[in-house]
């Protein structure tokens, strides 16, 4: 019998244990190994960085959720231009990320479409991913439409990918009857616009400025989503950002199911070093802080004053009060099988201090309750401690983290373009129309240091020689 424990269990497949639909961790993984996905790359998919970011994010998140495998069909004869994979062939990166590149056009697999739509018969689930300016959308291919995929904002491309993979996962799981039969979208320029999210007023301006330096606290699920999104943005080769990366943890097998910049070769290595090596290979500069974030945190001269916080720890969040950052954006995710798609975002300074949102009393964690499946496993395996620890771990998946990542980055990038900031934002990814938040306000703090984007003409993508 394979030993699957809290440090090795796939964090999304764990939901099958939590719901009681399987009797063991091994059965949960076997169930998820039946889930498969296909990505169709039509003409024009690679013409923008947003399109490239959309494809790479869809693939990287899907291979970690659809354990039966992900197929890619279409024209992969391009060199990528996103910083994280600049100069690499799309074909080689697709294989590196875990795709099976196929040459047959027809399929019955659930399919995500980028670029021109398929000319062959469509599968039952076939969804178009699209973007424009700060907006992104998924639509059933049979319904036509979608956004123009013209203005090049990679954050919107990532958002489209996250929605598409989430929609496909709900379809294979049977979580939502209308999955694949509805249009869903939102604006990063005004994330509280619901019915009119695609109106011109919410498209936002042309992406012109990007953060020059940032402090990333926590390099797990969310922190790596932030780093991944930064790696897709149009930084010039000589203006890649400087990042201070802070984490103290080692990579475990379970992290491979949630972290976009970890691979099996990184197991038992410090997460911060694995992430730094990939960003440095893309021309970023990094400084590493390999200790816990806490009340003793201080910023030294010339260090970034804007922080992206990705630590799921109430005590650490309370310590943001004294951290001396000028701007902090933090996100938290739901952890149960019912709410793991929920995203909550805070931006500081705001109307309340972190210690007022997360009170001292809230630091006490309730003991995990064992359902009948976990109780039976504990009896069979004579391991009540191990099963209790496994039950306490969150259900998590990187397509939720990817959406959270662009929502967080938007809170930093939007004010650089004269946009507003949101002190709080709640997004339910399963039903995106249910999003709420504080009234946006003009940012009044110290401006994040910035650089200008590298301008790129549409259709500039280079074919592999």
Image (cartoon, grey):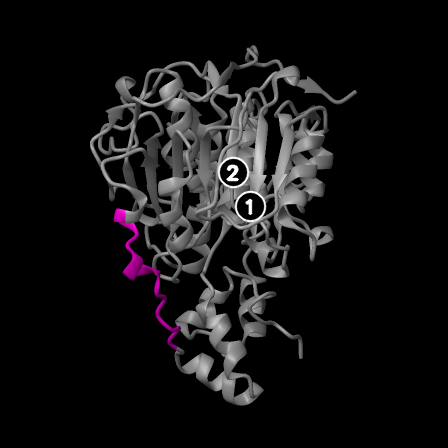
Q: Does residue 439 show up magenta in the picture? A: no
Instruction: Note whether residue 103 is visible.
Output: no
Residue under the point 29% across and 32% down: 422
Q: With 385 as the anchor, is 191 left or right in this view?
A: left
Q: Position of residue 92 (x, y in %)?
A: 74, 36
Q: Vertical placement of 40 versus 115: above or below? A: below
Instruction: Note whether residue 235 is visible.
Output: yes
Describe the element under mark 1 as helix, strand or loop.
loop
- Near mark 2 (Cα within 10 A), the count class, few <14, some 14-19 or many ≥20, is many
Q: With 424 as the anchor, is 146 left or right in this view?
A: right
Residue under the point 73% across and 52% down: 265
Q: With 455 as the anchor, is 156 left or right in this view?
A: left
Quarter of the rendering containing residue 6:
bottom right
Residue position marked by numbered label 1 in the rendering: 219
Check if mark 2's residue and mark 1's residue have beta carbons within 8 Å. yes
Separation of residues labelled 2 and 1 (CA atoms): 7 Å
Describe the element under mark 2 as helix, strand or loop.
strand
Q: Vertical placement of 240 versus 253: above or below? A: above
- Where's the C terminus, which quadrant? top right
**What range is drawn magenta here?**
356-369
Q: Position of residue 137 (x, y in %)?
A: 38, 33
Residue under the point 50% across and 33% down: 299
Residue position marked by numbered label 2 in the rendering: 216
Q: Does residue 359 show up magenta in the picture? A: yes
């Amino acid at each position: 019998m394979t030993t699957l424990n809290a440090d090795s269990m796939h964090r999304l497949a764990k939901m099958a244990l939590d719901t009681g639909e399987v009797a063991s961790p091994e059965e949960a993984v076997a169930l998820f190994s039946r889930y498969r996905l296909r990505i169709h790359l039509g003409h024009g998919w690679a013409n923008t960085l947003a399109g490239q970011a959309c494809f790479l994010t869809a693939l990287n998140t899907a291979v970690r959720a659809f354990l039966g495998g992900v197929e890619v069909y279409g024209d992969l004869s391009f060199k990528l231009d996103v910083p994280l994979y600049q100069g690499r062939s799309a074909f080689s990166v697709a294989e590196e990320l875990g795709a099976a590149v196929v040459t047959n056009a027809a399929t019955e697999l659930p399919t995500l479409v980028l670029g021109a739509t398929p000319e062959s018969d469509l599968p039952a689930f076939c969804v178009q991913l699209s973007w424009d300016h700060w907006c992104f959308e998924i639509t059933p291919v049979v319904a036509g439409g979608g956004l123009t995929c013209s203005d090049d904002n990679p954050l919107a491309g990532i958002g489209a990918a996250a929605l598409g993979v989430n929609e496909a996962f709900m379809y294979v799981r049977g979580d939502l009857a209308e999955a694949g039969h509805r249009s869903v979208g939102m604006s990063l320029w005004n994330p509280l616009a619901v019915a009119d999210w695609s109106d011109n007023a919410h498209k936002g301006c042309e992406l012109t400025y990007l953060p020059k330096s940032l402090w990333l606290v926590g390099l797990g699920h969310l922190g790596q989503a932030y780093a991944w999104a930064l790696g897709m943005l149009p930084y010039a080769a000589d203006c890649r950002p400087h990042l201070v990366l802070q984490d103290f943890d080692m990579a475990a097998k379970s992290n491979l199911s949630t972290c976009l910049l970890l691979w099996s070769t990184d197991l038992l290595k410090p997460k911060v070093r694995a992430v730094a090596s990939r960003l440095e290979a893309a021309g970023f500069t990094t400084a590493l802080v390999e200790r816990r974030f806490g009340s003793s945190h201080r910023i030294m001269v010339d260090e970034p004053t804007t922080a992206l916080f990705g630590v799921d720890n109430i005590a650490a969040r309370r310590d943001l009060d004294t951290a001396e950052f000028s701007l902090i954006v933090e996100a938290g995710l739901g952890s149960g099988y019912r709410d793991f798609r929920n995203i909550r975002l805070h931006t500081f300074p705001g109307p309340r201090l972190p210690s007022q949102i997360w009170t001292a009393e809230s630091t006490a964690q309730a003991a995990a309750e064992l359902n009948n499946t976990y109780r039976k496993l504990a009896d069979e395996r004579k391991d009540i401690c191990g099963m209790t620890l496994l039950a306490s771990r969150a259900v998590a998946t990187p397509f939720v983290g990817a959406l959270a990542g662009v929502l967080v980055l938007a809170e930093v990038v939007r004010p650089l373009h004269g946009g507003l900031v949101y002190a709080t934002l709640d997004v339910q990814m399963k039903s995106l129309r249910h999003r709420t938040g504080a009234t946006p306000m003009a940012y009044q703090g110290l401006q994040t240091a910035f650089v200008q984007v590298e301008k790129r003409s549409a259709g500039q993508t280079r074919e592999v020689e």
